[in-house]
Image (tube, rainbow, N blue to C red):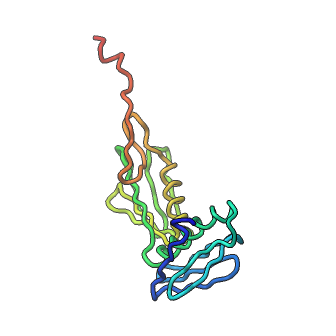
Amino acid sequence: MSRIGKLPIPVPANVHVELSEDRVLVRGPKGELLTPVLADVKVSFLDGRLVVERRSDEKRARSAHGLTRTLLSNAVEGVTKGFRKTLEIQGVGFRASKSGKTLNLTLGFSHPVSVTESRGITFTVEGTNVIHVDGSSKEFVGQTSADLRALKPPEPYKGKGIRYRGEVVRKKVGKTGKAGKK
């Protein structure tokens, strides 16, 4: 039995869960999320907890068991607490600002880059070089953060670009032939 899949998911009192055969709708203070359920597993709501059970012992059912439990757990956590990813911008002249629902980025290109909030995602700018991406869906928060980072990934020589908070960028030495000549 899957160690992750057999754990029940506690559902807080302010979260409403609707079960159907192939999906689970979770509503909470931060929004609502729809999670698909494969035919190989069965989801039930007992005593304020979601329980995921597999219908057979086939390989497909075993692999879907833990996955479904984790997706439902993320949905419950997302509608109650939400998820956040923090990005840092490093580089001279690189900065971020927010106007309305639009995130404006100056990243050393010949033009500014604008990104609009979508799918329950909100941007918060702290100072001029820290961006917080918030939302109820862990998948959308992660994908939006990855899309922002892909606009200007950190380069290995000076480390300029957009990186996740706490991400370590290994720097290269660069040219050394010129330093020894006079």
Q: Quadrant of residue 105?
A: bottom left
Tell me which residue sits at (51%, 58%) in the image: 114
- Relative to 80, 32 lies left or right: right
Residue shown at the point (50%, 87%) measured from the top left: 48
Q: Is residue 23 above or below residue 57?
A: below
- State the quadrant of the N terminus: bottom right
Towards the viewer: 67 or 55 = 55
What x and y, as percent, mark residue 132?
Answer: 40, 63
Towards the viewer: 117 or 74: 74
Measured as percent of width and height from the top left, residue 167 is found at 38, 49
- Name the residue rendered at 56%, 65% in the picture: 2
Q: Is residue 68 above or below residue 167?
A: below
Q: Is residue 109 above or below residue 8?
A: above
Dividing the picture into quarters, in which one does residue 58 lie? bottom right
**Residue depicted at x 55% and y 69%:** 5
Circle count: 0
Vertical side of 179 occupied by 44: above or below: below
Q: Quadrant of the C terminus?
A: top left
Q: Nearer the viewer, residue 179 or 111?
A: 179
Residue placed furthest toward the top: 182
**Residue 54, how many percent across, how many down?**
64, 71
- Outermost left residue: 182
Q: Position of residue 13 (x, y in %)?
A: 46, 88
